[in-house]
Image: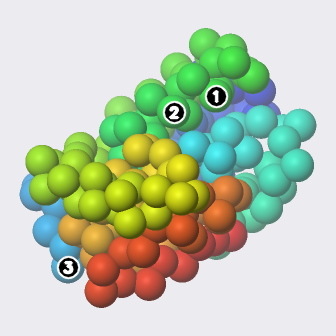
Amino acid sequence: GAGDGAGTGASRSRVGQSAGARRAGPGAAAADRWAMAALLDASFIVAAADVSDFNHEASVAWLDRVGEPLLIGALTLGDADHLRQRGLGIDATLALLESIASGGVRVVMPTTADLDRAGELLSAAREHRPRLTDAVLVAGAERLGVHRVATFERRPLAVLRPAGLVLDLEP
């Protein structure tokens, strides 16, 4: 697999490296189907790829423990690309794309309803200056019924209050 500065490409425990063993099935993303999935945020994706990141070992250990499908929001993908290329270079982004192409990570596209809900979340938490990427991630989690979010930036997500859902911010 393509290298990204995180060791060999053979390990399924690195987001952005070959992860063929972790595949989500084909078809529409129904809430009941994704309830046991985990959404990844950019801080987690960077830590998993960057061996010099303080949270690298924790991210790898978490990935080794979970067997659930891994999801990444389309906005988070752009955010992760920016951070990975800045710190690790183009190979890191190519490795992430390989992980997506192999089915190791599945991209979740925001719906119009997600964007509307993200606007509501941003307005409700405006004093904390939340980011659109985080609000769309929370809106997507609500829609899909996903409780688990892999992140090392808890505060930005904690200020956004999902409806009818308690987010488990891991690892």
* Residue type indicated by callout 3: Asp
Q: Which element type, helix, strand or loop, lies under badge 3?
A: helix
Kindly identify which numbered label has been placed on residue 79: 2
What is the crowding at mark 3: few (fewer than 14 residues within 10 Å), some, or many (at least 20)? few
State the SS at label 1.
helix
- Give the vertical position of 69 relative to 23 (above or below): below
Lateral position of residue 79 relative to residue 75, left or right: right
**Residue at 43 percent of width and 44 percent of height:** 133
Residues at marks 1 and 2, CA–CA distance in whole angstroms: 6 Å
Which image quadrant is residue 145 in? bottom left
Residue reaching furthest front? 127
Identity of the residue drawn at 12% across and 48% down? 112
Front label number (1 vs 3)? 1
Amino acid on which the number 2 mark rests in the picture:
Asp
Which of the labelled discs sits on residue 32, or is there none?
3
**Most foreground residue, 167 or 59:** 167
* Label 1 sits on residue: 83
If the image is split into quadrants, where does the N terminus sit? Answer: top right
Front residue (pair 84, 20): 84
The first of marks 1 and 3 along the sequence is 3
Which of the two discs, 3 and 2, labels the residue nearer the N terminus?
3
